[in-house]
Amino acid sequence: MQERGIYHMIKGAIHSTESFGSVDGPGIRFLIFLKGCRMRCRYCHNADTWDPRSDDMRTADELLDQAERYRSYWGKEGGITVSGGEPLLQIDFLLDLFRKAKARGIHTVIDTAGEPFTREEPFFSKFQELMQVTDLLLMDIKHIDPEEHRKLTGRQNDNILEMFRYLSSIGKPVWIRYVLVPGITDGDGFLKKTREFISTLENVRKIEVLPYHSMGEYKWKELGIPYSLEGVEPPGTDSVKYAECILRGESGDPHEKISGS
Ligand code: SF4
């Protein structure tokens, strides 16, 4: 009972919500963007979510009441997706939100970079509980190489890869996302090494290659932070297709598939 009392008080630091998300999980979804991220991905288009403070603090029930206004549009597959920022930084709130969502029969998705993951307590027990009320994770592989990962995001990747392994061990469905940045993540060797890692996982339902774009660059400027990818162009369609072939482990010569498509 005491625990319920504690969770009743929890409020999430919210960045924004969107009523009709169509790419962040299956079906039509209500999207909740939480504040706070400790990574500093050079291509981040949500730099305005980094600061964990928010003027918009809301309870799980307030958000779920808002989300359910759109429930008739969700169909069989839709539901809610919590993104950010990095949602796992607010794991107590997320746990409360998803427990209550499940009690309402709502499909739950987390869009995460996995950066806060650790097997240390108290995080790990909370994470295990969270997975019991999470249907799917959308998870980024920012870079497979530890040193390149650090250069790209400012953080290490060993705990992130460990999170992938853990999710595989419990059979939790994952969609992998890979941002293709020319000159940084599109190297053949890196793509093949990433594929090698993905092929050790048994829970991957989808692999998406997202072409780098600079649409969030203005937010860096607004925050007064230099944007280090200035001048980097988005990758071409062929590069994206090539990366998809490699990361998905499709058989045959990817170059032939592209020229024949
Ligand atoms: S993890 Fe996401 S929100 Fe955080 S810096 Fe990277 S792209 Fe931005």
Image (cartoon, grey):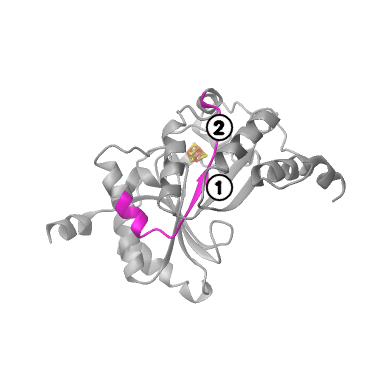
Residue nearest the observer in this picture, 254 or 155: 254
In-image side of 120 versus 82 (left or right): left
Mark 2 = which residue?
144
In-image side of 123 versus 17 (left or right): left
Residue 136 among magenta residues: yes
Question: CB of residue at label 2: within 8 Å of ligand 1?
Answer: no
Local secondary structure at mark 2? loop
User: Where 109 sits versus 233, above or below?
Assistant: below
Local secondary structure at mark 1? strand
Between the residue at mark 1 and the residue at mark 2, the CA separation in whole angstroms equals 13 Å
Name, please, the residue furthest toward the bottom: 72
User: Where 228 sits versus 244, above or below?
Assistant: above
- x and y, in percent, of residue 225 in the image: 52, 28
Q: Is residue 187 visible?
A: no
Instruction: Name the residue: 41% across, 34% down.
Output: 159
* Callout 1 amino acid: Ile
In-image side of 112 versus 132 (left or right): right
Name, please, the residue furthest toward the left: 2
Mark 1 = which residue?
176
- x and y, in percent, of residue 54 in the image: 36, 45
* Quadrant in the rendering for residue 183: top right
Instruction: Name the residue: 55% across, 36% down.
Output: 142
Residue range highlighted in magenta: 128-146
Instruction: Name the residue: 33% across, 59% down.
Output: 97
- x and y, in percent, of residue 31 in the image: 48, 58
Instruction: Name the residue: 51% across, 50% down.
Output: 202
